[in-house]
Amino acid sequence: MLTTSSIDMKIQAAPAAELCSDELTWDPWAYDAGPKRPQPPVYGAGASQWDTIPGSTPVQAEIPEHYRSMSPDDLARRIAAAKMTLGSRLVILGHHYQRDEIIRWADFRGDSFKLSQQAASRREADFIVFCGVHFMAESADILAGDHQRIILPNLAAGCSMADMADEVQVRSCWKQLGEALGVSPLPDVAWREMDIGVWSGLTTAEVIARHTAEWERLRAGEDLPRGGGETFAQFQGRILRSVEQIREIHAGEQVVIVTHGGAVRAFLLHCRGLDVSQFRQIDKIGNTGVSEVTIATGGRVVIHSVNDITHLDGLALFGEAVDA
């Protein structure tokens, strides 16, 4: 087996001008360290492969030669036999970004947090193989039982964004925010971004091309689970339940919520008394946009500002989100 077939086909079919780097055609084990080839930590093939990586990151050990020389069919037979032998003792988690050759073996497919939750529900499993990156496997380990072993197949699979700030920097940031606001920041997973299932990582154009029927039903007003993930009503529901808890605990106080634009949008939709089918009437929330709302006794809502990004004047904004 050289590079896997799905990647090979895409590279061969792409015009030369569209290829990012010849390094994307390297064998998967090009990043492994062997006795005759010491290797510093690297991220593996992809856009971040030569980004600076923390020196404490594990280095992938060399894959034995007999595995590297196997044909794809032989490898598939070995994997199938191992899965059958282990049965319910094994759970394989496949992140959306993985190749088809890996996803075919996954018991669950989804985004990192959802996969960690699904793995935690399988208490009979002794081994949880997370086909993702470092922080995803770490999240699964937090939720897993004491008897469960979390396995990251490729230790070179890291995430440059997750490594942009180390633990000391994150704790320092939390401390500074808390001191500035006079509070202690508290995490609340209810305000996480919407689960859009298999759409994760796709642009709007790619979603339309691959999931045309589903997209057309959504545009017609039907509130479907996006990509097999959440409906907008489900997404908004968990946010509003969190709002009620915050109101009970912090009645009469000022609360600052740092979250994704989609979550803010879902909350503002409720504040304006609009139905979930009307969510496009709420403008997209820009990066670091600030919205201010007062919820008075009795539930009366006053919206003071929406998506204030004047503090970003002069800065270039980029990136696309699926608006569905």
Image (tube, rainbow, N blue to C red):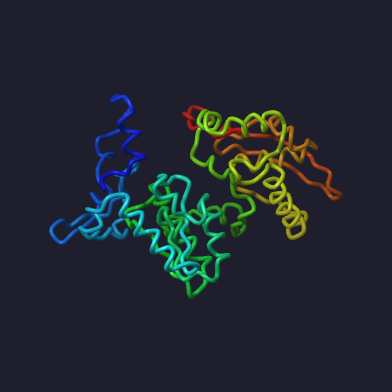
Q: Where in the figure is residue 309, as x and y percent of width and height? A: 58, 33
Q: Residue furthest right?
A: 298
Determine whether, in the image, residue 27 is placed left or right of residue 111. Answer: left
Q: Residue furthest bottom?
A: 147
Q: Where in the figure is residue 87, as x and y percent of width and height? A: 47, 67
Determine whether, in the image, residue 68 is placed left or right of residue 255. Answer: left
Badge count: 0
Quarter containing the C terminus: top right
Q: Residue at x 32, y 50 (%)?
A: 73
Quarter occupied by residue 10: top left
Q: Where in the figure is residue 181, as x and y percent of width and height? A: 61, 52
Q: Which residue lies furthest to the left in this view?
A: 36
Q: Residue at x 44, y 49 (%)?
A: 103
Look at the picture and state if 251 lies above or below 18: below
Which residue is at the front of the view, 221 or 140? 221
Which residue is at the front of the view, 201 or 171? 201
Q: Which residue is drawn at 41% across and 53% down?
A: 133
Determine whether, in the image, residue 72 is placed left or right of residue 294. Answer: left
Look at the picture and state if 103 lies above or below 80: above
Q: Residue at x 59, y 46 (%)?
A: 195
Q: Where in the figure is residue 142, as x and y percent of width and height? A: 50, 66
Look at the picture and state if 201 lies above or below 129: above
